[in-house]
Amino acid sequence: MGWGLLVGVLLGFLIFKWVLKSVNCWYYERNLEDKKYDLPPGDFGWPFIGNMWSFLRAFKSNKPESFISNFVNRFGLTGLYKVLMFGNPSIIVTTAEACRRVLTDDEAFKPGWPSSTMNLIGRNSFVGISDEEHRWLRKLTAAPVNGPEVLSVYMKYIEDNVIIALEKWSDMGQIEFLTELRRLTLRIIMYIFLSSESEQVMEVLEREYTVLNYGVRAMAINIPGFAYHSALKARKRLVAVFQAIVTERRERRKKNFTNVKKDMMDALMDAEDENGRRLKDEEIIDVLVMYLNAGHESSGHITMWATLFLQKHPDVFKRAKAEQEEIVKNRPPDQKGLTLKEIRQMEYLSKVIDETLRVITFSLVVFREAKKDVRVCGYTIPKGWKVLVWFRSVHFDPETYVEPKKFDPSRWDGFTPKAGHFLPFGGGSRLCPGNDLAKIEISIFLHHFLLNYSLERHNPDSPVMYLPHTRPKDNCLGRIRRVST
Ligand code: HEM
């Protein structure tokens, strides 16, 4: 009798679990007819939350690879897996070939960010506008940051600020190295886009962006105490700050337009499409909220990781430093500061940066949506489903990168990855417009760090957090020490 009851309860539990695990499948595949047999393998997780729990658990327990390897172990190395994430039926794409196809086929795919992300980044920013509007605004806004020649205009500003920052930090005792770097990259992007160096504005932006970014990768629960709720509030405060800046600029332009240097804000205010349409304040604000966020978080984090890797690998540090010393040695005596030509000579440092971009993969995933039913690598992605382009898997593919977890800049000696195998800045029409700026900023910082400083971490074994972005839990607490006179 006792055994019978136990078996009955166990059986009931298994049936209940099977029903729960099948609910999403029935619901999301019910209208697909025969197409459902062409879907990639996968698992829609639990009702309502889908696979979010296993995603967050993998990333919060410091095993980010386990989320995808779980699919690989269960369904094989198919490269595409169906899931339910961020509230949408989605296909995760993990191979270079499939990722490249999704990024470059604008006929079949459009941006597909979760609505929670759009609420935070802004529906008038690049994540929410039509392809046509995107082409127009992208051309307008990418011009001031695209191409090394254009960027050489900002090199002096960047270098002066790097020198001042490193000197200041070395006098400050213990600092959160990452927080200070994020402030530095924010200062640079504020100068380029807003011509502003206001400490007060910078402090507010830095604080609010931190809260905003925690919400971007969190579950979209708008209840006090949850990261998404706080992020929505942070967005409101960011919008208020940008609105004040826009209003002030409009006033200034009315009074004294001709004498003032033009920047990105002016370009947005002057912009007029072929139908004579001009941008409203809320559109300008959304573009700025997006650009300033994208333009400082990523560069700040990657600069920190490159510094940490250099510090952790003395042989790499030595080789990178020798290269910088050589550059300074060959410099004409009357030359002040770095030139673009010198940055181009930093071949080894460029490999250090590329390897950092690969190992850290700052943008672990980007989102697209299928505009129509699309065949990719033998499977169907149904119209309206989201596609999660999983860069992390591409950068950790052992077929392309032997011992992928190892930081090894020399793997780039004589190696050019095939198209789609190295995507730190994405690809296709959405390729990061700040890629050259980011590489120049990071190179300038590392040049001065390698020549004159070292980093002494307070907790060298501080655990790493992967959400919202990969970083040491203590924000890299430590001291910057001057090592030369
Ligand atoms: C190491 C630094 C950086 C990394 C790793 C990075 C990474 C990326 C990636 C992967 C994308 C593609 C998103 C997608 O496909 O949907 C992207 C887009 C973007 N990035 Fe960056 N980025 C960096 C620096 C910057 C900087 C400095 C700026 C500012 C100028 C910037 C501005 C943008 C913008 C505006 C987009 C959206 C482009 C579009 O949708 O057309 N990024 N970035």
Image (tube, rainbow, N blue to C red):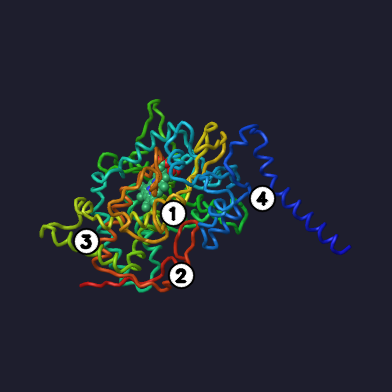
- Residue 404 appears in the rendering: yes
Q: Residue furthest right?
A: 1
Q: In the shown orientation, is residue 467 left or right of residue 270?
A: right
Which label's residue is closer to the chain start, 1 or 2? 1
Q: In which quarter of the image is residue 53?
A: bottom right
Residue 460, relative to residue 424: is it above or below? below
- Residue under label 2, please give it: 462
- Residue under label 3, please give it: 323
Q: In which quarter of the image is residue 406?
A: bottom left
Position in image of residue 249 (x %, y %): 36, 44
SS assignment at label 2: loop
- 469, 428: nearer the viewer: 428
Check contact, mark 1 vs mark 2: CB within 8 A: no
Q: How crowded is mark 2: few (under 14 residues within 10 Å), some or many (20 or more)?
A: some
- Quarter of the image with the N terminus is bottom right
What amino acid is at disc 4? Trp
SS assignment at label 4: loop
Which label's residue is closer to the chain start, 3 or 1? 3
- 331, 18: nearer the viewer: 18
- Residue under label 1, please give it: 396
Check contact, mark 2 vs mark 3: CB within 8 A: no
What amino acid is at disc 3? Glu
Position in image of residue 112 (x %, y %): 51, 40
What amino acid is at disc 2? Ser
What amino acid is at disc 1? Phe
Which label's residue is closer to the chain start, 4 or 3? 4
- Residue under label 4, please give it: 46
Check contact, mark 1 vs mark 4: CB within 8 A: no
